[in-house]
Image (cartoon, rainbow, N blue to C red):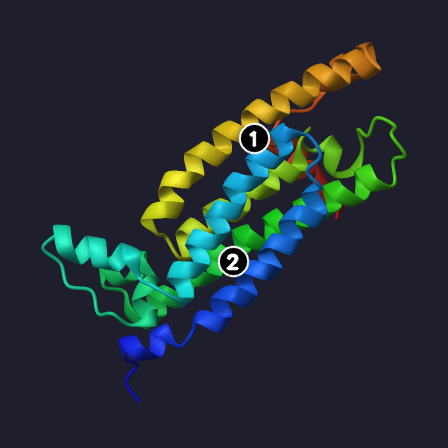
Amino acid sequence: MTETYSDWLQLWPYAILMTVIASWVLYHFLAPASWRDWASAGLVQAFIIALYAEMYGFPLTIYVLTSFLPIEIPLVHESGHLWATLLGYGRVGAGIEMAIGYAFVITGLIMIIKGWVKVYYAGGQLVTDGIYGLVRHPQYTGIFLAIVGQLVHWPTIPTLLLSPAIVLAYGHLARWEERRLIAQFGSAYADYQQHVPMFFPRWQTVRQLLAAS
């Protein structure tokens, strides 16, 4: 049976469900406290809403592309796999695109949850082992990976515009947190900064972890 645009519009309940689930993960595992935390989380919340509103609701990006560019994109749900649609890779390309995207998303979620667990059970002590031995801000790295994954899986104009703003906001938040941590832990945190990168792990460290596993 051929899918139609009206079938896409009937997917709004999925948009609401996925937005609620993703929002719960965001606020539970990042646990924003200060206004800086809430401002950064708000940008991610906007990303989530924009993503699922288009994925299961109103295809704004497809409307814009077909209005301003000399291309035709069918108004069906599968067309939301935009890279595969524009490059003509069809269902197989969409499946590959989705698999790559979700690999990034799942890796990001694992980093977010592992970071939360470490901090939760640390009791206010400085954490430098486990996932924190890989990068200093694993939860923020997890957010970046999840965003990249969704841009691969289901790119939209609003999420493309929001992505750099999210990266800048969490980069600023990380630097503010580190000033606070240096004031709290002194030379112990300064030494930690010298040995562990902020967001992106060193290849040597990743290779050692893979070899150990």
The residue indicated by pointer 1 is 170
How far across and how far down the image is residue 180, in percent? 73, 17
Q: Which of the marked residues, 1 or 2, is nearer the chain's N terminus? A: 2
Above or below 191: residue 208:
below
Question: How many other residues sit within 10 Å of disc 2, few (<14), some (14-19) or many (≥20)?
Answer: some
Numbered disc 2: secondary structure: helix
Q: Residue at x 52, y 58 (%)?
A: 102
Front of the two marks 1 and 2:
1
How far across and how far down the image is residue 36, in percent? 61, 28
Q: In the rendered image, which quarter contains the N terminus?
A: bottom left
Numbered disc 1: secondary structure: helix
Whether residue 147 is visible to the viewer of this picture, yes or no, is yes
In this view, the residue farthest toward the front is: 35
How far across and how far down the image is residue 91, in percent? 33, 72
Q: Quadrant of residue 171?
A: top right
Above or below 96: residue 107:
above
The answer to whether the residue labelled 1 contacts the one labelled 2, judged by CB atoms less than 8 Å apart, is no
In this view, the residue farthest toward the left is: 70
Q: Is residue 162 left or right of residue 182?
A: left
Whether residue 144 is visible to the viewer of this picture, yes or no, is no
How far across and how far down the image is residue 199, in percent? 60, 30
Q: Is residue 164 left or right of residue 213?
A: left
Decide which of 63, 104 is in the foreground and name it. Answer: 63
The residue indicated by pointer 2 is 102
Q: Residue at x 42, y 60 (%)?
A: 53
Decide which of 195, 125 is in the foreground and name it. Answer: 125
Q: Quadrant of residue 5?
A: bottom left
Q: How far is the residue under mark 1 from the one under mark 2? A: 22 Å
Mark 1 residue type: Tyr
Decide which of 25, 112 is in the foreground and name it. Answer: 25
Mark 2 residue type: Tyr
Q: Quadrant of residue 124?
A: top right
